[in-house]
Amino acid sequence: MRFDYAYQAIEAARLGMGLALADRLEVNEDLAEGRLVTVIERPFTIGQSLYLACARGPQLNARSRLVIGLVLEWLRSRGAPLEAAARQLQLEFAASAGEGRQGIT
């Protein structure tokens, strides 16, 4: 999904619909309260000063898990320092993807 306004993307992330690039000031309270988690451990330059945040794993739907897993892998492959929570999400996503493939030949 793509949104015209940052607040819409942030609200979608709060609802477990995926990731949002957001200014730290816009998500500070969500991060402090645990509604959102940061994905990257320390600043990682991607051309702008934004944060990548998403809902905790259990709140995410299958499509969001797939997209977030791909984004995390892309970031990791380019040397982004992933937060512990993001590394945990990656492990959970990999495990659930493996479960979904069992029995498929």
Image: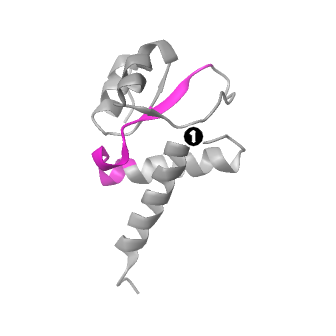
- Residue at the image position 46 percent from the left and 46 percent from the top: 68
Note whether residue 27 is visible: yes
Q: In the image, is residue 9 above or below residue 90?
A: above
Give the residue at mark 1: 83
**Magenta region includes residue 33:** no
Above or below residue 27? Residue 44 is below
Q: Is residue 56 left or right of residue 44?
A: left
Q: Quadrant of the N terminus?
A: top left
Q: Find numbered disc 1 in the image and state the secondary structure of the residue it sits on.
A: loop
| Closer to the camera in the image, 102 or 24 | 24
Residue 32 is situated, as x and y percent measured from the top left of the image, at 41, 23
Residue 43 place in picture, x, y as percent? 66, 27
In the rendered image, which quarter contains the C terminus? bottom left
Left or right of 15 in this view: 73: right
Looking at the picture, tell me which residue is in the foreground, 105 or 73. Answer: 73
Query: 26 left or right of 103?
Result: right
Residue segment shown in magenta: 49-64
Which x, y percent locates residue 55? 36, 38
Q: Residue at x 43, y 14 (%)?
A: 26
